[in-house]
Image (cartoon, rainbow, N blue to C red):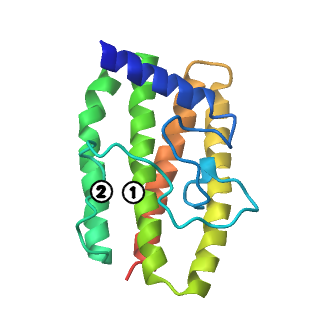
Amino acid sequence: MKKLLILTLLTCSFLAGCGNAGNEGANVKQSENPVQGDNQQENQPQADAPATDKDSNNSAEPDTSVTGTKEAYLQKLDEVEAGLADLEDLNEEGTTASMNEAAAETFNRWDTALNEIYGELKKQLSANEMDDLKEEQRDWIKQRDEIAEKEAAEFKGGTMEGLQLVSTKARVTKERCYELVNQYMK
């Protein structure tokens, strides 16, 4: 019961911050990493630290012990997808709160993977390539948020609006993970 209450509070905090792009995510460290767009503050230098603080007990997070090859990262992404099966019970409960919790965790896991990929690409790409990717990533964040807001607008004012917003962000972030690995990873 205590765990459910904490997760519900975190979900509510997350959803309450969706309209405030500078403060979204209760457990996310403020960073300048363009991958972590919800916490990005423009016009500040790029930080080299990871974009998010993550719970090391989350078994669905990508395994950082695998080498940074394209094949290894594609495997890691497939593992993230397979690991989402542990959230099926929340979705099957059918309550808005449980579906919001599942959507927030799904987004969190894909965002973690995206940040890991971005960190690996920092090691693999030249400075010029990385500068280009940073700009591309900033544009992608804006597009992701626009897509999510557009899809959520279908449910404007309803209980499903926040769920649709976070679910869309999760879906688009997953797509971006695969795109970055396939396009840039060596």
The answer to whether marks 1 and 2 mark residues whose Cβ atoms lie closer than 8 Å is yes
Which SS class for mark 2? loop
Please tell me the numbered disc located at residue 62: 2
Which residue lies at the image location 27% right of the left edge and 47% below the top edge?
60
The three-letter code of the residue at mark 1 reads: Ala
Residue 135 placed where, x, y %?
A: 67, 70
Residue 94 visible in the displayed image? no
Residue 85 visible in the displayed image? yes
Q: Residues within 10 Å of mark 1 (few under 14, many from 20)?
A: many
Precedes in sequence: disc 1 or disc 2: 2
The three-letter code of the residue at mark 2 reads: Pro
Residue 103 placed where, x, y %?
A: 43, 34
Q: Which residue, given by chain and number where applicable, does mark 1 sit on?
A: 113
Give the quadrant of the N terminus.
Answer: top left
Q: Quadrant of residue 57?
A: top left
- Residue nearer the viewer, 76 or 121: 121
Q: Is residue 35 left or right of residue 114?
A: right
Please tell me the numbered disc located at residue 65: none
- Residue nearer the viewer, 5 or 80: 5
Which residue lies at the image location 63% right of the left edge and 67% below the top edge?
46
Q: Quadrant of residue 85?
A: top left
Q: Residues within 10 Å of mark 2 (few under 14, many from 20)?
A: many
Residue 159 placed where, x, y %?
A: 57, 18
Q: Is residue 40 above or below residue 127?
A: above
Q: Residue furthest top?
A: 1
Q: Is residue 180 above or below residue 58?
A: below
